[in-house]
Amino acid sequence: MINGKKAVNRSLRWGMIGGGGTSQIGYIHRSAAQRDGNFALLAGAFDIDAARGREFGQALGVAPERCYPDYASLFAEEAGREDGIEAVSIATPNNTHFAICRAALNAGLHVVCEKPLCFTVEEADELEQLSREKQKIVGVTYGYAGHQLVHQAREMIAEGILGEIRIVNMQFAHGFHNEAVELQSESTRWRVDPRFVGPSYVLGDLATHPLFIAETMLPKLKVTRLLCSRQSFVASRAPLEDNAFVMMEYDNGAVGTLWASAVNAGSMHGQKIRVVGSKASLEWWDEQPNQLRYEVQGEPVRILERGMGYLSPRALEEDRIGGGHTEGLFEAWSNLYRRFALAMDATDRRDTAFLEDFWYPDVHAGLAGVRWVAQCVKSADAGAVWVEG
């Protein structure tokens, strides 16, 4: 059980790029990183508007001289300080991720980056190689993958309780963009602009989340080929899709489906995953994150509750407040940042043995997401044809 004790023997000196006052995601980065004291926010370039960013950083308690106008200034100035940052989180629009991540690695920093890491497989390959060369980690914030019941499912599947895996059904389908809300919302506008998000909207922004949860639960399954159909129901978003269906085939003979949508009118969030085996099935829904449905053919449904002693030790490692109370996105993110801190510390100590069997959403996960989106776009744009996974 996590009790607030630092995962490493000190607080890692940490900075942020983006995540300012108008950011949808900046606060959860700061809350997750600092919850257990594993990171201390010392510097940042919080906003494209330098004055606004400096004002916001100071309101967070960052020294005025360490609130920088841009990421290049931050990296250069911090490198010259004895107490300069060791790690940085990138919470900026998608089209900036690759350049900032590459610059951070070249500056000798560990990186936590919003997804997608970049727009092309070639860029993702470069970041993966650079991460290896610089011996720094790149963590990717697939937030709900840090939830303990996702890891309970992983353990149950690994033990063979479900039998042979046959079907993986994934979705992330909310309804908040069923109309052209981007006309009034600045924080949504860039998400549907190809200049900022690249070749896709919901495939990259939504679909990669349940895809990575499935990869976390089923690390041995590999997609061999896929077929994607995508639509722009709000016509002004074309060529970007606001709805997509993907069919997948896995190397063990299993099949998968994924529905990603921002126009599922009436749905609050709609992120679910169901894994069907030859003996039993598991289902997890992020709107009811405390419960994991375990369904054995011919037996009553079992609801496994978060934080209970019957869960696996691996799942209970991620518990924060015991059974009965609710945990959700903030706790899952905090669990990820705790793991990022452990991975950074082990990497700096060159503890390869620790890292061999240590799970976190790493640069390989980021690369896999970029490659999957690229193949989905390729399939859809060719008329919904099968392509390699």
Image: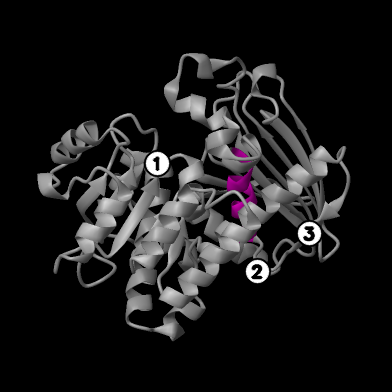
Given residues 346 and 233, the one toward you in this image is 233
Identify the amino acid type marked 3: Lys
Residue annotated with mark 2: 158
Relative horizontal placement of residue 328, taking residue 26 as reference (left or right): right
Q: What is the quadrant of the C terminus in the image?
A: bottom right
Magenta segment: 206-217
Q: Is residue 259 above or below residue 336?
A: above
| Residue 227 image position (x, y, % from top left) | 83, 46
Given residues 264 and 311, the one toward you in this image is 264
Residue annotated with mark 3: 279
Relative horizontal placement of residue 284, taking residue 258 as reference (left or right): left
Q: Main secondary structure of the magenta part?
A: helix
Along the polypeptide, which appears first: circle 1 or circle 3?
3
Q: Quick one: label 2, few (<14), some, or many (20+) residues within 10 Å? A: some
* The image quarter in which residue 229 lies: top right
Along the polypeptide, which appears first: circle 1 or circle 2?
2
Question: In what element is the residue under mark 1?
Answer: loop
| Residue 130 image position (x, y, % from top left) | 48, 70
| Residue 332 image position (x, y, % from top left) | 42, 50
Identify the amino acid type marked 1: Thr
Identify the amino acid type marked 2: Ala
Q: Is residue 109 above or below residue 53?
A: below
Residue annotated with mark 1: 326
* The image quarter in which residue 20 lies: top left
Q: What is the quadrant of the N terminus in the image?
A: bottom left
Dot in front, 3 or 2: 2
Query: Distance of mark 1 from mark 2, alpha carbons?
Result: 26 Å
